[in-house]
Amino acid sequence: MTRKTIILIAFILLKFLLQCILISQDYDLQRDEYLHLDQGQHLAWGFQSVPPFTSWVSFIIQLLGNGVFWVKFFPALFGALTIFIVWKAIEELNGNLFALILGATCILFSALLRINTLYQPNSFDILSWTTLYFIIIKYFKTENTKWLYFGAVVFAIGFLNKYNLVFLIIGLLPAILLTEQRKVFAKKELYFSILVGFLLVLPHLFWQYKNNFPVFQHLNELAETQLVNVNRVDFLKSQLLFYIGSIVVIFSSFYALLFHKPFSKYKFFFFSIIFTLIVFMYFKAKDYYAIGIYPIYISFGSVYLAYIFESGWKRYLQPLAIAIPLLLFIPIYNVAFPNKSPEYIIQHSEKYKKLGMLRWEDGKDHLLPQDFADMLGWKELTLKVDSIYSKLPNKEKTLILCDNYGQAGAINYYTKQKIQAVSFNADYIDWFDLSKKYENLLRIKESNATDAELKETSPFFETALIAGSITNKNSREFGTSIVAFTGAKIDIRTRIKDEIDQKKSYR
């Protein structure tokens, strides 16, 4: 085993170790994680919220026991593979050992540590961006057309994980046209590889067609409820924070791509990042959508700085260059991760507020960062639902209907009963079991809608009462109530079908 291999393995092991200590035991899983885990029980070629890849990983997690360890293992694995790809890219660019260590350090102590704590499509999305960029480097270095086909496969898999990868192509194509590498567009193999990629994503596109393209409804809802609050200046500021310890390395790559002769064939990468960021800003994308851009630029910057620091007094700057990402990570460690209790964060809220971490998607500041608040109250909700469910008459004929996907997913993940909660929200609208007649209804209602639910639904049941609620004030779901209706006077499936049809009519 070579020295380089030993160091690479050490970085990967350190990556997994860090991911294990970044989340306090005070927190549950995060809202989105429950939805993605439930998708593994409903395998399909698409979902209203995301493409199918995450559901495949969720299915594997379920085969492994569905424990929290495996839920957290896969995003950490995708982060470790990102380090590996950056390492291989540096080797392709003829970087020495210093360049390899610098690049791996920059990726390790970056925003990826935060992204990789959550089981969401983002971790694999970043890996997809990095891998596709790496394959592009391989193609233009060797001009071996097999890399065009590899690129098509990687794009297809990345697209089936998250549509965000389309922005890479949008930024890359005009950039290549501006350089001599535009000759690639004259190769027939490029178009054959595009056909391969198209065939790989065709089942998902067909699923979208059969379901009236729910992706467009999802994007419209996203634009109206979340992206409308995005500030383009804040978007750019966040780009600097994501890789704060690697700023010098990244900006060095821009200079090197323009003026460092060994990188002349990769000059289009300089224009590509400009076009990609412009498109992101035009669509008012969330800041973290762009995180996948930068790992490959860290590869270029690391190799160039290794060249600059190769001899003379500048070689003494090598330890400092490696230390900077680590030193700047230390203060970030204290605020960017859910490794502090909610009480601690609330008592020290000013430093979180200065970084904009208390601002939620509604554009307002709250007590905790939104992702942290989304990791509280779920076990409490499920424990109370289980307790109430166990006391119901004919409990097996009970429908558990939630206001949002987080509630439904959390109940399904933590429950000790044989129940499946559903919702009219997100993908759960397709997962109702209407094959049996329900006698009871457990309605999980957000705090501001409980009274209205009682008034609207009580006439259709013999009894109705508020049986419990989430009491954790730090939870985003604080005040969410469990309303128990028993003894149905009508077949509630009719009302449910009408609601489902109405919701789906907007797709």
Image: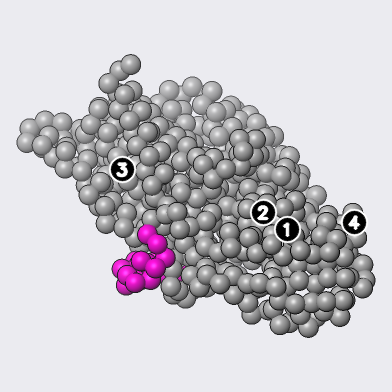
Compare marks 4 and 3 and give the one earlier in the sequence: 3
Q: Are marks 3 and 1 in contact (CB under 8 Å)?
A: no
Residue receiving disc 2: 415
Compare marks 4 and 1 and give the one earlier in the sequence: 1
At horizontal 40% and vertical 62% (from top left) the residue drawn is 341
Question: Separation of disc 4 and disc 1 at Cα?
Answer: 15 Å
Which dot marks residue 106? 3
Q: Looking at the image, can residue 322 be seen?
A: yes
Compare marks 3 and 2 and give the one earlier in the sequence: 3
Question: Separation of disc 2 and disc 4 at Cα?
Answer: 21 Å
Compare marks 2 and 4 and give the one earlier in the sequence: 2
Callout 1 secondary element? loop
Q: Position of residue 199 (x, y in %)?
A: 69, 34
Q: Residues within 10 Å of mark 3 (few under 14, many from 20)?
A: many
Q: Is residue 116 left or right of residue 11?
A: right
Residue receiving disc 1: 421
Q: Is residue 343 magenta?
A: yes
Mark 3 or 2: the one toward you: 2
Give the residues in magenta: 340-361
Residue receiving disc 4: 436
**Amino acid tagged 3:** Cys
Q: 73 or 124, which is in the foreground?
A: 73
At horizontal 54% and vertical 23% (from top left) the residue drawn is 146
Q: 416 or 493, which is in the foreground?
A: 416
**Amino acid tagged 2:** Thr
At horizontal 16% and vertical 37% (from top left) the residue drawn is 318
Callout 2 secondary element? loop
**Amino acid tagged 4:** Lys
Compare marks 1 and 2 and give the one earlier in the sequence: 2
